[in-house]
Image: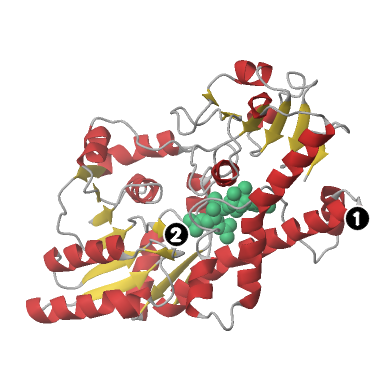
Amino acid sequence: MISVVGLGYIGLPTALMFAASGEQVVGYDRNEQIIHMLQQNTLTIDEPGIKEIYKKALPYIEFSSELMASDIYIVAVPTPYNKNSKKINPYLVIDAVEEIVHDCPSDAIVVIESTISPGTIDVYIRPIVNRIEQEKGKKVHLVHAPERIIPGSMIRELRNNARTIGADDSRIGTLIKSKYSLFCEGDIILTDIKTAEMTKVVENTYRDVNIAFANELSKICHVAGIDVNEVIRIANMHPRVSILSPGPGVGGHCIAVDPWFLVGDYPQLAKLILAARTVNESMPDFVMERMAFVMREHHIHNLERVGIYGLTYKENIADTRESPSLQLLDKMQKHMAFGVKVYDPYVMNDIVENQYHDFKQFVSSIDFLVIMVAHDEIKTAESEIGDKIILDCRNVIHSQKVYRL
Ligand code: SAJ
């Protein structure tokens, strides 16, 4: 039996994939409300394809707020991020592993999927596991199989992405590989734990550096009077060039966070990584400068006539963690710039001031629209926003008249 510990964005879809492949699964979470909802057949996250997988999984899965004895435990608890110290807090992972190792049968395998700073297992987790092993006279095997799936496409990526499995013992690694192979059609690469920890962080850092390059190019092209998106489109036709898209900043809990682990642990060496983070973090300021420029050019003096489109960290999802729009609003407040209107079709609760929930009402209350997120809705709304002044930070509006970054 497999216990999946932590039923959030990663744990729940992973538990469902195992169960839909015929494995007996217990989904465990300390949050009784989540367990109650799942026991009442209410899915707690929405992702394309999840309902179908859930139906297939139902005969093989149960949900519990008590940890049950299993052969394999998959830890997918969150790693909260402290914006000021730029560090994640590994204590939820440490607590989960400690609880498991206390209760599990000897020879159980504990697979950590949560993203952790390289070295976390050796520094924090192994000593606790070793101590409990000695106290209780049992053996526990540690594995790190970092999640790699992208919000908005999780089920598809769980099925198709390659995976990394880091284990101390190749026999254990091979066994866990055979479990993930039940639903994962991508390559599954076996390695050691430290390499798996580093690889995960390197993947997200690579993406951050690539986006920073695009963002820096957008600033250069702005001064040079060239359309950066056209430059990137043409450059990417070269067989060995693949530049990502510039935007108003990098949000989410992964790309904007993981590179800091390398900067924090290797400050003398991680210079390019720090520079990339600095460029990406400067983008909300750049948006604010561009907004001020457009407002001056059009003699707009009242921020109540300005609307921010999008609050989530990226398109077509409801997640607002570290979102560039929230960063922008925060910066505006620090400059005593109040009154802008805000709208996001995916954010149902009021999380900022002057938040609208109806697109037409939002658009009719403003003269100047700042597009921060490329939700599908805005791509097809060109006729409704035709006469507005637009700053398009995501290159979604194709009219000649819009301002870009
Ligand atoms: N962004 C740009 N330009 C781009 C691409 C993204 O500005 O060309 C921005 C997005 O708008 C967003 C941020 O970057 O604000 C991050 O979005 P994302 O789509 O790049 O990535 P995440 O954070 O949703 O998911 C990433 C993925 N990592 C990689 O692609 C290497 C995912 O596979 C990981 O599982 C996830 O991090 C994670 O949990 O670590």
Q: Is mark 1 within 8 Å of ligand 1?
A: no
Q: Nearer the viewer, residue 201 or 25?
A: 201
In-image side of 396 versus 267 (left or right): right
Considering every residue shown, the one lying at the far left of the view is 136
Counting from the top left corner in percent of width and height, residue 220 is at 83, 58
Q: Nearer the viewer, residue 5 or 180?
A: 5
Q: Residue drawn at (40%, 67%), measured in percent from left and top?
A: 116
Counting from the top left corner in percent of width and height, residue 286 is at 71, 50
Q: How is the image coloured?
A: secondary structure
Q: Which residue is mark 1?
A: 224
In-image side of 30 versus 288 (left or right): left
Which mark is in front, 1 or 2?
1
Q: Which residue is mark 2?
A: 147
Give SS at disc 1. Answer: helix
Residue 306 can be seen, yes or no: yes
Residue 384 falls in image quadrant: top right
Name which residue type carries label 1.
Ala
Give SS at disc 2. Answer: loop
